Amino acid sequence: MTGHSAEVWLVLLVAAVAANLPFLTDKLLFVGPLRVPKPWAWRLLELALMAALALLVGLALESRVGQRQPQGWEFYVAGICLFLTLAFPGFVWRVLRRHHG
């Protein structure tokens, strides 16, 4: 890989995994007590926390590579939309699949 493409792929991988984590477990904040079914408010809170974590990973990698570039609100809105798009497989698995048994 040339340039900084490895860092970009790492941030995308972290974001894809983080976006689906709230839908894959019924534990509160991934380590707390098991709640079946887990309330949607907790899933949304976990999704917001994972989005912040992915953003922090991206900012840390950008700072390590070089000078951070200032971003406007458009960047963050596009990032949130991308994060929600990456969360779609986990949402489908948790909500839209048929429960057998």
Image (cartoon, helix red, strand yellow):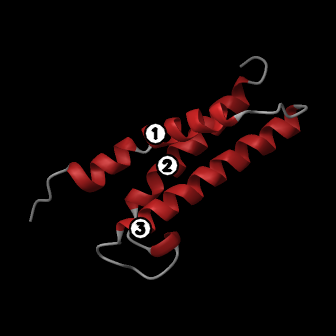
- The secondary element bearing badge 3 is classed as helix
Residue 61 left/right relative to 5: right
Amino acid at dot 3: Ala
- Residue 35 x, y percent position in the rendering: 35, 78
Category of crowding for the residue at label 1, using alpha-carbon neighbours closer than 10 angstroms: few (below 14), some (14–19), many (at least 20): some
Q: Marks 1/3: CA distance?
A: 19 Å
- Residue 94 x, y percent position in the rendering: 29, 55
Q: Marks 1/2: CA distance?
A: 6 Å
In the image, which disc is placed on residue 86?
A: 1
In the image, which disc is placed on residue 19?
A: 2
Snapshot quadrant of residue 80: top right
Between marks 3 and 2 in the image, the one whose residue lies nearer the viewer: 3
Please report whichever mark, 1 or 3, sits nearer to the chain's N-terminal start: 3
Category of crowding for the residue at label 3, using alpha-carbon neighbours closer than 10 angstroms: few (below 14), some (14–19), many (at least 20): few
Snapshot quadrant of residue 12: top right
Residue located beneath label 3 in the image: 41
Snapshot quadrant of residue 1: top right
Quadrant where the image shows the C terminus = bottom left
Q: Residue furthest bottom?
A: 33
